[in-house]
Amino acid sequence: MPRVAIIGLGLIGGSIGLALKRAKLADLEIVGHDAEYGVNRDARKRGAIDKEARHPAEAAEGAALIVIATPILQVKSAFEAIAPALAGGAVVTDTASTKRDVMSWAADCLPEDVSFIGGHPIAGKETSGINAAEASLFDGHPWAMIPALDATESAIRAAENFITAIGAVPTLIDAEEHDSYLAAVSHLPLVLSTALFSLASRSQAWPELAPFAGPGFRDTTRLASSNPSMSHDISLTNRENLLHWLDRYVEELASLRKMIESSDTQEELIERFASAQAARDAFMQAPPPKPGPERPSDPMSAGERMMSFMVGEYVVRRTKEVQATLEKRASGELDDRGKR
Amino acid sequence: MPRVAIIGLGLIGGSIGLALKRAKLADLEIVGHDAEYGVNRDARKRGAIDKEARHPAEAAEGAALIVIATPILQVKSAFEAIAPALAGGAVVTDTASTKRDVMSWAADCLPEDVSFIGGHPIAGKETSGINAAEASLFDGHPWAMIPALDATESAIRAAENFITAIGAVPTLIDAEEHDSYLAAVSHLPLVLSTALFSLASRSQAWPELAPFAGPGFRDTTRLASSNPSMSHDISLTNRENLLHWLDRYVEELASLRKMIESSDTQEELIERFASAQAARDAFMQAPPPKPGPERPSDPMSAGERMMSFMVGEYVVRRTKEVQATLEKRASGELDDRGKR
């Protein structure tokens, strides 16, 4: 039976499992592993996986698609752990929020006969863990897809179909571009939000301020509730881009500060507020199209296409195994029952 | 019939009208005025007011409670416009987001026999106008209350009952404190949010960035969609406090920037992210109590108490009017039917 392995069963890994289950693909087995005690069992109980694996390699063994959904800084060791167990032709993907380092770890650690397609769902929420997982988490959201240079065309299709099957919109992009764009619209907001909450809550006046912290403050600081390890891993693995945008942001604040300070620049200040409002309202009313790759329409669903790829790989792999067994037997290495 | 006047029928003024209607106070007449063409009629059609007034003085005439819900920079001229029409003993309040200037305008413009209680609902949304108004806008939110030094005790009770009747929680505070606290938790977030959206949307890469702007970016920039006049008025009337907090914020960012930049400070960085998360989660799970003034429990509802005050004022005023008429008549100024 074709198998998908999910390594890391937190909010993202768990939601991937639930979304795959929701797609009701016949004969798909989902094997999962999480390093944290008890999470495997919780994931199985929640119906996110069919089978618990004791370690990453056990989950990856015989899987046609392996999804690494661990924290960023654990992706490299996950690659190292699964590498020996990977079947030729398997597709490996991940969900980390930054991509440059992940792409280079994949190139270093994964075998050559495996295709790596970096992935990053542009979705999520500030809660974490398997209990926060939900099948609809990715619905309609872009999912960045960064194929390694040597990824096969069929592996790219498989990753694309996997992403579509769980409700997201595959969006092809280069790793450097990804990290630079996400620094602006995701990692910078995370730092700004954290700085605001830190500043207010560490102020001596916080007990007096807090009762007046309304919905605006709550929304602006929502990202300060993000998983701190994730925030840290992002800051570390996307440092240059983040610092670049942080510096530009401080310049922007300085320019606004000048306008607020002087009575001569009130008109410019109104203009700045008004153009930000107009631009944001336009953005919210007509969000930019998600640049998913264009495909000819196809009577098969994405899930079916994913399965057909996976079954195909499974058949190829089984054929190779059978071939190898027959060769070994012919050479006298094995007895008739396949034993040495 | 006791009358409430609402001057300014946008999101806040309109919602006050709807919330008063929802309180189903018998024999209350709500008269409204808005400077913008057509808004009076829309407010009446939406059921936020009973009667349209052609100008602020007409609305204020004979009203026991007058609520100024115009943009901040129009509050002073609203005070000037209603001053000649105010009945002695009337209570005037407002809803402006900054309070120091408003308190001094009230002291300058309103007659001495009228009580001013500054007000500020800590609620709202980024949409504006009468069509965005809703009766539940203030439910459970704090409503800052800043009585003028010479406000009477019964006027303070009336304002408090008015605030409670429309679902909010009256929160007594001093004007300077109000402006300083709100600078931190409301006006600073407004500027930060605007700066982020401005920076991203005016970047050359915006068409490429925008598709990756997910829920985190949307929430962090929500306040950039605020009414630009309101944002500007706030920046102007709370300039010193806002600049103070803006400077402290830039220092906070500089400290985070240092931690991100150096490999030696990664532990401090994790610690900063973790403590912000812990503090925000605690804040969200157990929001600070709203420091409403303690009152002995009372079998009358706040709305009934407000009405009883207003009816009381109405009776006093009518008595005075009757008295004056009788005196004038006795002195031969009027004929028996009250005409000159």
Image (spheres, coloured by chain):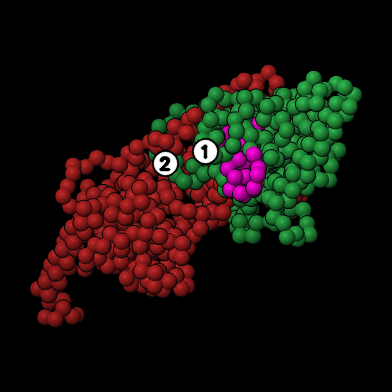
Chain colours: A green, B red
Task: Depth check: give the residue in front, A17 or B334.
Answer: A17
CA gap, disc 1 and disc 2: 39 Å
The residue that appears at 62% across and 32% down in the rendered structure is A32
Residue B260 sits above or below residue B331 on the image: above
Name which of mark 1 and mark 2 comes first in the sequence. 1
Question: Label 2 amino acid?
Answer: Phe
Question: Label 1 amino acid?
Answer: Arg
The residue that appears at 32% across and 55% down in the rendered structure is B166
Task: Depth check: give the residue in front, A15 or B127.
Answer: A15
The residue that appears at 78% across and 32% down in the rendered structure is A87
Residue B238: where, in percent of width, then height? 49, 45
Res. A247 visible in picture:
no
Task: Depth check: give the residue in front, A22 or B6.
Answer: A22
Asked if the stretch drawn in magenta spans residue A271, the answer is: no
SS state under label 1: loop
Quarter location, residue A12: top right
Q: Where is mark 1, residue-wise?
A: A46
Residue contact between numbered discs 1 and 2, judged by CB atoms under 8 Å = no
Quadrant assignment for the C terminus of chain A = top right
Mark 2 crowd level (few <14, some 14–19, many ≥20, 10 Å Cα): many
Residue A23: where, in percent of width, then height? 62, 49
The residue that appears at 54% across and 54% down in the rendered structure is B226
Magenta region: which residues? A7-29
Residue B170: where, in percent of width, then height? 31, 46
Q: Return the mark for residue A178.
A: none
Q: Where is mark 2, residue-wise?
A: A212
Res. B310 visible in picture:
yes
